[in-house]
Image (cartoon, helix red, strand yellow):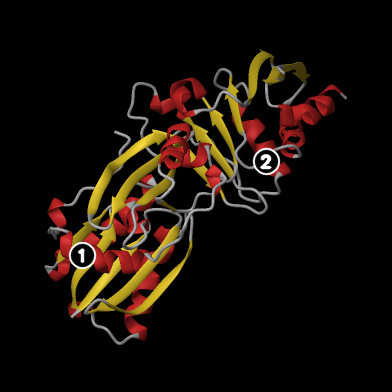
């Protein structure tokens, strides 16, 4: 069943904490798509996700690299930024990470949509003013029901 | 003179040395995403512990795909540089054919992700179905239609028990049917282009 929730994030710390909270419910193979304008907080969310997964390495935007891997126990984190893949050759092996052994966070997913399963956790971030953001979170994955319960609370 | 066998086309790292079709020594373990940092180190180790000089290698055997996009190119790059430097030939194999059972028709499978599989069907050196990519439903149907064939490979992703065969032995047995090439004439096989 489709689940949907809208949250107001007052500042960067709220975005980080959203990432930390989501980290408690992720599992191998889960894809999180992140949409929103430049500066909306997509990479900031992934920073929080990494913190929640106990990854010590600093998370930086993979806009240039396209993919960054954070090898970590018990769960690897793969961070993709598809921004530079618009109108480019997309056949570069990303499916090994999208359908892989870790959780995969994808910024600008519309440019590699054919590689992303329809079962995904979608997070759309909108810049409201100064520090404030709106997060629209939705998914049709039943396994994530508990996450949505937690987000309500 | 020795055969050098390399494979990082999937999740495994495999290096072996053979002489006159007998395996002398091998290193083989799971190294998903780590093959690039480990392979040259392990290769050096294997040669040293068998007192084999690089110059005593006269052919390289390796699978060139399909498989992991990055993995295929790791062992192939190492093989090409060796072959160029030593002026020797490379025997390129299908990553699928080397999974087969000897003397039995075999459906060989590798996870291609996104609900698809790489599939090749072989009866020793004979090709029954040329390497291709199919949806997993089509693969299951093919398996069900051929109950007398072995199903080979790591098939946990299909919830099946695939048969695991010795890739090194397969390469040594099939070598006589493979045309060796120099390092400038070998291309990786991705099947997704």
Question: Which mark is nearer the camera, 2 or 1?
Answer: 1
**Taking the image as drawn, is residue A66 in sight?**
no
Label 2 element class: loop
| Camera-nearest residue between A121 and B149 | B149
Q: x and y percent of residue B128 in the render?
A: 27, 45
Q: Quadrant of the C terminus of chain B?
A: top left
Image coords of residue A136 (percent x, y): 69, 17
Compared with A96, B100 (above or below) is below
Residue drawn at point x = 51 percent, y = 28 percent: A116
Q: Residue at x 27, y 56 (%)?
A: B76
Q: Chain of mark 1?
A: B
Residue A103: give x, y in percent of width and height: 61, 40
Q: Residue at x 21, y 48 (%)?
A: B187
Measured from the top left, where is residue B64 in percent x and y? 28, 52
Residue matched to label 1: B175
- Residue under numbered circle 2: A27
Check disc 1 and report its element: helix, strand or loop: helix
In this picture, residue A94 sits left or right of residue B16: right
Outermost residue toward the front in this view: B148
The reply to whether residue B44 is visible in this rendering is yes
Q: In terms of image quadrants, where is residue B12?
A: bottom left
Count of labels in the image: 2
């Amino acid at each position: 069943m489709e689940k949907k929730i809208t949250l107001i994030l007052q500042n960067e710390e709220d975005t980080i904490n959203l990432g930390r909270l989501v980290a408690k419910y992720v599992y191998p193979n889960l894809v999180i798509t992140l949409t929103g304008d430049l500066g909306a907080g997509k990479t900031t969310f992934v920073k929080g996700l990494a913190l929640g997964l106990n990854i010590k390495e600093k998370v930086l935007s993979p806009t240039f690299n396209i993919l960054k891997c954070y090898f970590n126990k018990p769960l690897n984190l793969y961070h993709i930024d598809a921004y530079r893949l618009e109108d480019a050759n997309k056949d570069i092996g990303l499916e090994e990470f999208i359908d892989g052994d870790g959780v995969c966070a994808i910024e600008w997913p519309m440019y590699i949509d054919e590689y992303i399963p329809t079962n995904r956790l979608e997070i759309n971030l909108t810049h409201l003013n100064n520090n404030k953001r709106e997060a629209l979170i939705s998914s049709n994955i039943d396994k994530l029901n508990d996450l949505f319960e937690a987000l309500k609370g | 003179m020795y055969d050098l066998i390399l494979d990082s086309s999937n999740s495994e790292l495999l290096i072996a040395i053979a002489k006159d079709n007998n395996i002398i020594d091998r290193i083989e373990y799971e190294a998903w995403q780590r093959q690039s940092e480990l392979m040259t180190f392990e290769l050096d180790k294997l040669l040293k512990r068998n007192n084999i000089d690089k110059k005593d290698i006269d052919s390289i055997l390796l699978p060139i795909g399909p498989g992991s996009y990055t993995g295929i190119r790791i062992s192939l790059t190492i093989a090409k540089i060796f072959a160029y430097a030593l002026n020797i030939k490379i025997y390129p194999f299908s990553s699928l054919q080397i999974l087969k059972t000897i003397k039995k028709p075999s459906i060989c499978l590798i996870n291609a992700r996104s609900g698809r599989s790489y599939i090749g069907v072989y009866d020793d050196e004979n090709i029954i179905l040329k390497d291709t990519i199919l949806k997993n439903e089509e693969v299951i149907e093919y398996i069900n239609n051929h109950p007398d064939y072995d199903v080979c490979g790591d098939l946990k992703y299909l919830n099946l028990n695939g048969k695991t065969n010795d890739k090194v032995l397969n390469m040594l047995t099939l070598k006589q049917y493979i045309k060796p090439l120099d390092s400038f004439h070998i291309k990786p096989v991705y099947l997704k282009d």
